[in-house]
Amino acid sequence: MSLYHLQKLLYQLNRDPELQQRFLEDKEAVLEKYKLDEEELAAVKKPDIGLLYILGVNGQILMHYAAMCGYAWPEYIQAMRDALEEHGNVRAGLYVTTDGKGAI
Amino acid sequence: MSLVFAGVCSHGPGMTGRKDMADSDDVETLYAAMDNMREALEASRPDALVVIAAEHFANFFMNNMPAYCMGMAEDYEGPIEDPAWLGIERTSVPGNPDLSRRLIERTMQDSDVAYAEEWKFDHGIMVPLHFLTPRYDLPVIPVNINCQGPPITPLHRAWAFGQALRKACDSVPERIAVVGTGGISHWPATPDSGKINEPWDRDFLQRWAANDRARLLDYTDEQTYLEAGQGGFEIRTFIAVSGATEGSTASILYYRPIPIFAVGCTVGIVDLEVAN
């Protein structure tokens, strides 16, 4: 687990249009600069927004990445709900502090 | 001069970005309330607007997270979000570095704040500005209170920051307006987005309108997280405004839970006694 680095990647993508462009052109070149494990790399590349939520990415970071990936708002919310069904509770981060289900 | 205006409002990105998905009466009444707030702000003839916000990882991250930060830039760009997603065009917002510096120096006498000469606005500031200064012609001085990445500042420190900011406002010749912007109970950007604890919100707003320090500080983060969600941590922005206006009660112009905007939308104005 490297939630810090995963969130850092998404934070930097969210605020930097040039990095976004480089990422869209060559994901591997951008991703190799971050210490991510295989599951995180796969979730970012796919993108699997629901799994990123389960891995613990803060929604305030994740919603912008979802928008960047073309998710409409209802699709974004549904992706997280589906992921809770598929993967079980959130594994790390802020949403794990209560029952691990995040907001629900 | 002094503080000539103080108020609070919501900043949910849905307020602009998802207005077409909302009930038209919700949109019309909320927009009318924001318009009333703009008119009150303009009537106070401010020279600058201090926005006390709770940004969402637009500038500050867990690599170096300030509990409090004030902007000291010539100008600010925003929104960082896709303009189409947020429903607000990307623009440049004027700052006032000289005034910022004087306010920061005075605030630092009583509160430890970081400063930033570079700052990109996210919806947390752009949504309020879209309504309150739609021509982006009033110099803005942004303040951020970290409400997103724990550990976060205790509530009593948010009050103390507000007090320190007030002393700073009173120490400069300019007319200063302060707007705090945050959610009350809400679970933004999570699977439970749209959930709103209305009784909790109304109770909080009662405490806020009464400027009741003891009751405003009488929350633990554990309790707030359970009852008001992650978004409830943003009450710090409201509490800072209360600290800045200690002794003055306030009026709630608007409160209505609007689930598609993911928050109980709120507009409040402090009943300040201002000498013209």
Image: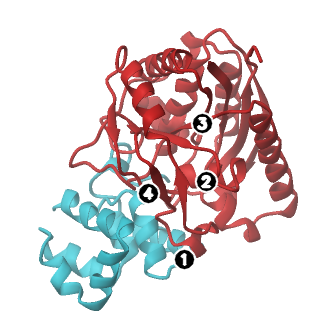
Circle on res. B48 = 3
Q: B112 or B25: which is nearer to us?
A: B112
Chain at numbered mark 3: B
Q: Which residue: 85% across, 50% down?
A: B29
Q: Residue type at mark 4: give it.
A: Gln
Chain at numbered mark 1: A
When asked about the image quadrant of residue B135, the answer is bottom right
Work out how far the residue at label 4 is from the one at label 2, CA to CA, in angstroms. Answer: 11 Å
Circle on res. A60 = 4
Work out how far the residue at label 1 is from the one at label 2, CA to CA, in angstroms. Answer: 18 Å
Q: Which residue: 68% across, 49% down?
A: B133
Chain A as rendered: colour: cyan
Q: B203 or B13: which is nearer to us?
A: B13
Q: Residue type at mark 1: give it.
A: Glu
Please name which of the two marks, 4 or 1, marks the residue nearer to the observer.
4
Q: Which residue: 18% across, 86% down?
A: A28
Residues at marks 4 and 3, common chain?
Answer: no
Q: Residue type at mark 2: give it.
A: Gly
Work out how far the residue at label 4 is from the one at label 3, CA to CA, in angstroms. Answer: 28 Å
Check disc 1: other Cα within 10 Å, few if <14, some if 14-19, many if 20+: some
Chain B as rendered: colour: red
- Report x, y in % for residue A7: 28, 61
Residue under numbered circle 2: B12
Q: Is residue B179 above or below residue B89?
A: above
Quadrant in which the N terminus of chain B appears:
top right
